[in-house]
Amino acid sequence: MFDIIPAIDLRDGQAVRLKRGDFDQEERVAEDPVAVARSFAEQGAPRIHVVDLDASRTGVPHEGALIREIVGAVSVPVQVGGGVRSLARIEELLELGVARVIVGTSAARSAGLAREMLSMFAESLIIGADAKDGQVAVQGWLETTGEPVADFGRRMVDLGARRFLITDVSRDGMLEGVNLAATRAFARAVGVPVIASGGVADISDVENLVKAQPEGIEGVIIGKAIYAGRVTLSDALRVAR
């Protein structure tokens, strides 16, 4: 089964979308993120992707109450990312009922912490591999580490990573199309399931990713394309089936 995962990015209690992660290019897409989550679940989404945007920059949780409300409002699994920098935060989110937690900056910054996180929560963790000009981006995509994203992926697999979310930062929120070649190359490099993210422009992106499923791509996160009416969730789910 190929997962179509609609995204809800949270800021100031609302659902927004950014362009290339730029907080100065913010577009509000819904005032009631809980209603959006319910709608996605009712339409058949197998899981929902939620990001605490401010936390991704600061490392301080901002939307805990809203995340709890979203998790309680839907019957499908919810995965959450944004500013997860400690074992305690992973535990908090899992206790809220979150099914999977996405960890990016903390894993890239500290191999020791990454090893500890993966040893304790491997099955519930998704390692976020955010690529900016081929290098790992951290701190809400404001900085890069200098490490090639494929090298980072292999390093995390050696530490026990079982699943990745790969995002091309330059395409995120731009409706310019998925970087299919880079996504496929990353999936081949790591050899574990990979979720694609960033740049879905139309249904052809979904079709191409579904065709690449044998290479290890197990799903795609779609945000801007749904809110902009470029892709309907029902069409994406049909292609995935």
Image (tube, rainbow, N blue to C red):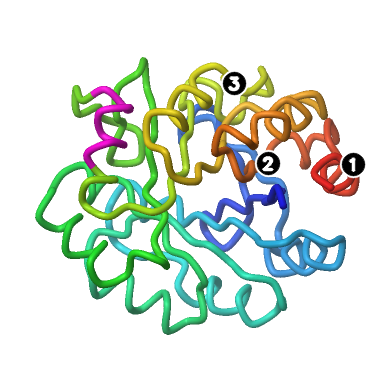
Measure how far apart labels 3 and 1 are at the Cα level. Answer: 20 Å
Is disc 2 placed on a helix, strand or loop?
strand
Front disc: 1 or 2: 1
Residue shown at 55% from the left, 29% from the top: 172
Is disc 1 placed on a helix, strand or loop?
helix
Task: Tell me the tag on residue 222.
Answer: 2
Residue shown at 31% from the left, 31% from the top: 137
Residue shown at 72% from the left, 52% from the top: 1
Q: Around disc 1, counting alpha carbons within 10 Å, would you say few (fewer than 14), some (14 to 19), or many (20 or more)? A: few
Write down the quadrant of residue 146 in the picture.
top left
- Earlier in the chain: of badge 2 and badge 3, it is 3
Q: Can you name the residue that lies furthest to the left here? A: 112
User: Where does the image place residue 108, in percent across and percent down from the top left?
Assistant: 22, 42
User: Where does the image place residue 79, in percent across and percent down from the top left?
Assistant: 53, 62
Q: Amino acid at mark 1?
A: Asp
Is disc 3 placed on a helix, strand or loop?
helix
Q: Around disc 2, counting alpha carbons within 10 Å, would you say few (fewer than 14), some (14 to 19), or many (20 or more)? A: many
Front disc: 3 or 1: 3
86 relative to 146, above or below? below
User: Where does the image place residue 165, in percent across and percent down from the top left?
Assistant: 47, 43
* Residue for badge 3: 180
User: Where does the image place residue 121, in percent across and percent down from the top left?
Assistant: 32, 70
Q: Tags 2 and 3 in contact by the CB under 8 Å rule?
A: no
225 left or right of 62 in image: right
* Residue for badge 1: 235
- Earlier in the chain: of badge 1 and badge 2, it is 2
110 left or right of 91 in image: left
Measure how far apart labels 2 and 3 are at the Cα level. Answer: 14 Å
User: 28 or 171: which is nearer to us?
Assistant: 171
Name the chief secondary structure element in magenta: helix
Residue shown at 50% from the left, 73% from the top: 98
Q: Which residues are magenta?
A: 148-155
